[in-house]
Image (cartoon, helix red, strand yellow):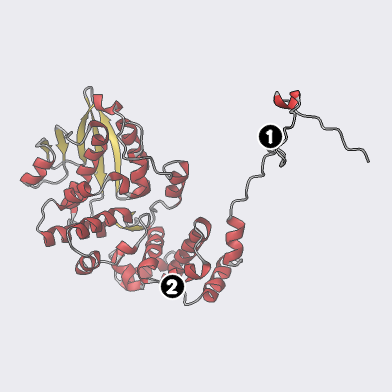
Amino acid sequence: MEGIPLSRASQLLQVTATLERRGFTAERMLEQAKLPMWHYCDPEDLIPTQHIQALMDHAARSLGSPTFGLEVATDNELATLGTYGRLVANAPTVHHAFQTSCRLLHLHTSAARNWLAETDEEVWFCRSSFQGPEVGRWQMEQYVVARLVEQVRLGAGPSWCPAKVCLQTRRTLEPEVREALGDPEIRSGQKFTAIAVPRALLVQPLRRRGTAPADVGATAQSRLRRSAPASSFVDTLRQLAGSLLKEEGPPRIEAMAGIAGLSVRSLQRRLAKENLSHFQIVDQARYQAATRLLEESEIRITDIAMDLGYTDSAHFTRAFRRWSGVTPRAYRIAKKPRPLPLRPKPLGRPAMPMNGSTVAVPKRAAAGMPLLVAAPRV
């Protein structure tokens, strides 16, 4: 059985941010859509892609907005789409942004992939997406098109619009969608979503707002890779359990079965084939979350215990010792990077005497050569 399609929570947080700007509370909208309170997650946590689509669809219906997917992308800059968004938005040129997006998208979501298709005069920036439930699919495709266009506009300017667009949907486009995209030539019913970009725009440098954030280098990419969406069913279930820990404590098997689209009994049978139980999946998710927090943060051990659903730090310490053979404190100390040895300071100018008198500087020292000092007589 393939894994559950997962995406970073940063995309759902963009949806809730747009809702709150329009006077709706995220909690109420998620509750009405019968979804977990995912907006309490960290932007880099992994959640079901179909839940993002479901929230978009419910919001579009509640607001009476057929272009809600476009609105979400327009309201929230690419750089707010977690680490992935910042890495793409801080590429040097439009072409580099495309390449970064193609290379890193699988670390942001397992539900889509990007690629470039080149012709003599233009480059097609393409995305194939997870073809799951129909609910919310059109709103998600609107969002995707707007994100592809934004990557070009970072270099070409805010008024740029594509001349040709490919869409997977077969529906008749709303006038608002056509207008927002600049009334391009639309090719519907395609196997992927894409926009045509003139080759001349690829070399355009990206316009940035303010200074580049610190976490856009190799370290940020390394963190993304360590927490990338898994491909197997059991691993994605474990990742979901880790995200749900922050939302409601240790997740119940009924919640996990619902997300997986299975009955409780079917989920138990599926796990039994892997010699696993629901309790073990949650236990493993707790251990992974604990090690990450101990390694990457300075959060107090007592607070980590509370975040993972333990009643006190003593219970957490016993569980952690069972997992790893050491206490949480010992684990954190062992994983803390050792400071580099200090280099000897180069000889500088001698300090001015306290009485204000001057001191002659030997020529060898003044010239930057080592100063030989005779040993004092005993």
Which residue is labeled 2 in the image? 309
Q: Residue at x 51, y 60 (%)?
A: 298
Mark 1 or mark 2, earlier in chain: 2
Numbered badge on residue 333: none
Which residue is labeled 1 in the image? 346
User: How far across and how far down the image is residue 280, in percent?
Assistant: 46, 69
Horizontal arrangement in the rendering, residue 8 relative to residue 148 (left or right): right
Quarter-of-image position of residue 314: bottom right
Packing grade of label 1 (10 A; few <14, some 14-19, many >=20) is few
Q: Say which quadrant the C terminus sits in.
A: top right
Horizontal arrangement in the rendering, residue 82 relative to residue 53 (left or right): right
Which amino acid lies under the numbered mark 1 shown in the image of this protein?
A: Pro
Distance of mark 1 from mark 2, alpha carbons?
53 Å
SS label for mark 1: loop
Q: Residue at x 17, y 44 (%)?
A: 168
Asked if residue 172 can be seen in this view, the reply is no
Q: Residue at x 34, y 32 (%)?
A: 96
